[in-house]
Amino acid sequence: PAARRCRGQLPRPAFPEHGTPMSSKPISRPPPPPPPPSSAARQPPPQEWSVRACSIFGIPVFLHFSLPLFLGFLCLTHARLGAIGIIFAVCYAAVLFLTVTVHEFGHCLAAQKVGCRAERVLLWPLGGLATCVMPTNPRDRMIVAAAGPATHLPMTLCWLILSATTGYPIRFWSPAVPLEASSLYHWLCWVGLYINVLLFVFNLLVPVFPLDGSQLLLNFLLLRGATPARAARIIILVSVPMAVLLAGWALVNGNSLGCFLVLWLGMQTWRLHQAAAAGRLETHPLFVDVAPRGGPGMSGQAQAV
């Protein structure tokens, strides 16, 4: 009889068949881990060919491997002026990258001020890249983007004061005297003034990624209620004629570095167009965490230049 069992034998449990649950109660599973914060950890190609040089305010500064080539190119183009031309080329590069470094740290310190993290600064022949974890609030993103160009205002004032001590007239488009040993200081003051005014205007008025104007225009449009897809279309439509104008300026002035810069900016605009056409804006650095994964909408990291 069923009632008889061997002593010590326990009833056999009713095992579920084919993986069916033993209880009708749903199995609770732990929620998936949250996605990593928008990191600027997605590094564009320029950052893959760099070496760490130093750390300022706890933020690492990297130098691109092509910087020696850039310095050699500057020296070569000024070698026709003799030793003074080579000295000027080296000083020009020093003033340029000092200015760019201050600009990038303007972005980094502003990002820290609004509670975010600055990860690194890269210096390369086309300028600098500050990689920051950006806030999700468009207003805070605009503050971070505008902080870089804002650094040029006090730097311009400093160069104006220094220019006044040279004894030569202050002119923006060209130095007042030819480059000689006696006028080298005047030329460096002019370079500092010229670079700061140019970078201030260039970063504010050219809305091409990764220039600061693209961040400012994007977040202004988001504050006005535009979707990321519409904002991307507007940025592309504005970027194309601006790139054409810049190309014309570079060709007329015979500026080979400007030609390379326009070519690179054109490539960035094309990549933005591809991401928008494929409905994958969330994969583009300008729209990381602004366009949520899987569809249009809104939510912030990026890179500032």
Image (cartoon, rainbow, N blue to C red):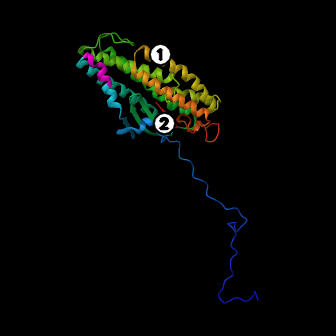
CA–CA distance in space, label 2 to label 1: 35 Å
Residue ID at (70%, 88%): 5
Residue ID at (46%, 23%): 262
Image check: 67 left or right of 265?
Answer: left
Name the image quarter holding residue 18: bottom right
**What kind of secondary structure does the magenta stretch mostly adopt?**
helix
Q: 77 or 106, which is in the foreground? A: 77
Q: Which residue is mark 1?
A: 248
Image check: 278 left or right of 123?
Answer: right
> Looking at the figure, which quarter contains the N terminus?
bottom right
In the displayed structure, 146 sits above or below 248; it is: below
* Residue at the farthest right position: 1
Q: Give me the disc on residue 209.
A: none
- Where's residue 213, x and y in %? 52, 26
Q: Amino acid at mark 2?
A: Ala
- Where's residue 231, x and y in %? 61, 29
- Where's residue 228, x and y in %? 62, 33
Instruction: Verify whether residue 31 appears in magenta.
Output: no
Image check: 290 left or right of 174?
Answer: right
Q: Amino acid at mark 1?
A: Gly
In the displayed structure, 168 sits above or below 74; it is: above
- Where's residue 196, x and y in %? 41, 21
Name the image quarter holding residue 291: top right
Label total for image:
2
Residue ID at (51%, 22%): 206
Neighbor class of circle 2 (other Cα within 10 Å; few <14, some 14-19, many 20+) is: many
Q: Which range is magenta?
A: 73-81
Q: Give me the disc on residue 111.
A: 2
Mark 1 element type? helix
